[in-house]
Image (cartoon, rainbow, N blue to C red):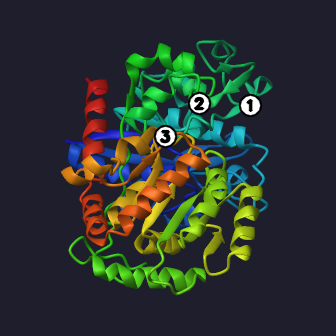
Amino acid sequence: MAHPVLAVVSEAFPLVKTGGLADVAGALPLALAPEGFAVRTLLPGYPGVLARLEGAKPVVDWPDFFGGPARVVSGSAAGLDLLAIDAPHLYARTGGPYAGPDGIDWPDNGLRFAALAWAGAQVAQGAIAGWRPALVHAHDWQAGLVPAYLRFGGGPRVPSVVTVHNLAFQGQYPKALLAAFRLPPAAYGVDGVEYYDTIGFLKAGIALADRITTVSPRYALEIRTSEFGMGLDGLLRERASVLTGILNGIDTTEWDPAADPRIAAPFDAKRLAAREANRAALRQRMGLAAEPSAPLFGVVSRLTWQKGIDVLLDALPELLASGSQLAVVGTGDGALQNALLRAAQSNPGQVAAFIGFDESLAHLVQAGSDAILVPSRFEPCGLTQLCALRYGAIPVVSRVGGLADTVIDANEMALAAGTGNGMQFSPVTRDALALALARTLAVWRDREAWQRLQRQAMATDVGWQRPARHYAALYRSLIA
């Protein structure tokens, strides 16, 4: 009989997505099923979530739920067993899950996600008649208060796991909101939710969860240092014995170049010539010059300082001087977006930028680019490079976090041994990136070596089966 698990998360693909968190939340429950775990995922009842829910039925009613009535609705969508919090006063809004159409965060996000975590703790402790999970798995700061409600709210003891997807986003709110968040005064302490004179959502999860995971082994080490610890490195060092790094995977059905309906032509490692149709389609869609002999670099990313987009812009002259082309898809910091648009205007046919997110275009960039650039200053795991490996677009990555864990540098010996699958560089500077571009182009010009490298990349195991086994082992240790 499968062990019941409750996952608490603010987004899950394909219902609602702003980043890699949603991809993980949508894929991990399915990967855990063969390991003997039946996951139900609790989400805020955003309009798009409630609209997709099949077989919806109410299972919990809360007349007074953080400022208004609410209920928990059970149903399914996209193969996921779902619980949605139908609380219109908190979640029935146009825009994204965290911000309005103007891109500005909702001013009551603290209340909205305290409510999500409180609901998660209530469900974990048996609020749904006839169902109680063996453990609860909370994802990122939005669900970070789940262990706090379990610890300070009374009720049955339920084991908890908190996964840190990105330590840079922590969720900090004024301590005056303690009562509004339904936390008792005893919770506000250095061993509880207090964090630099605020209520720290992620800090609370890290301090109070039974187990902490993050999304790559290297990142689990990096965040214990002052350089990458974002102010939480001391606490993470204290809790190192319960901290584990487990690499993310990707949904290899959703990301399958041999059967991807979003790309121009299917291909696999034995039919690399078919990628050429995707290179042509990407150039046409992005408005790049029809130059099959030009190396084509792609970027699918949040356009932020963390992702090193400013470093890419600094190195752009070297990329253009080589005759290469660049296709960028993403959204983020306004200044970086504008800089990319100016680069595209100044270099028509050679640089193209799509500001926004388009799932189909993201697939085409992976299928049509020769290489994918990921110059992140820090990267908990990264999914872009995993998709790139799957699609034979050679990842050129900085040597940090999950990028270092998943991309094996194709230096001369690694190429000779057949183990390299991409290019690494360090530190994250213009000069280091320019050298990595030069190394990549040197291999690209050797067509036999390049195709060998592409096949090695496509042979990399980027699926969820191996990570799911690690999560299953962690879950079993908690249940035991």
Q: Secondary structure at mark 1?
A: strand
Q: Are marks 1 and 3 in contact (CB under 8 Å)?
A: no
- Left or right position of 343 against 468: right
From the image, which quarter does the N terminus lie in?
top left
Q: Amino acid at mark 1?
A: Tyr
Task: Residue at 51%, 32% (x, y): give it.
Answer: 121
Q: Which mark is residue 173?
A: 1
One can see residue 334 in this view: yes
Q: Nearer the viewer, mark 1 or mark 3?
A: 3
Q: Nearer the viewer, mark 3 or mark 2?
A: 3
Q: Position of residue 188 (x, y in %)?
A: 68, 16
> In the displayed structure, would residue 201 be above or below residue 44?
above
> In the displayed structure, would residue 416 be above or below residue 344?
above
- Left or right position of 403 against 411: right
From the image, which quarter does the C terminus lie in?
top left
Q: Position of residue 8 (x, y in %)?
A: 49, 42
Badge 3: few (under 14), some or many (20 or more) residues near its Cα, within 10 Å?
Answer: many
Residue holding disc 2: 202
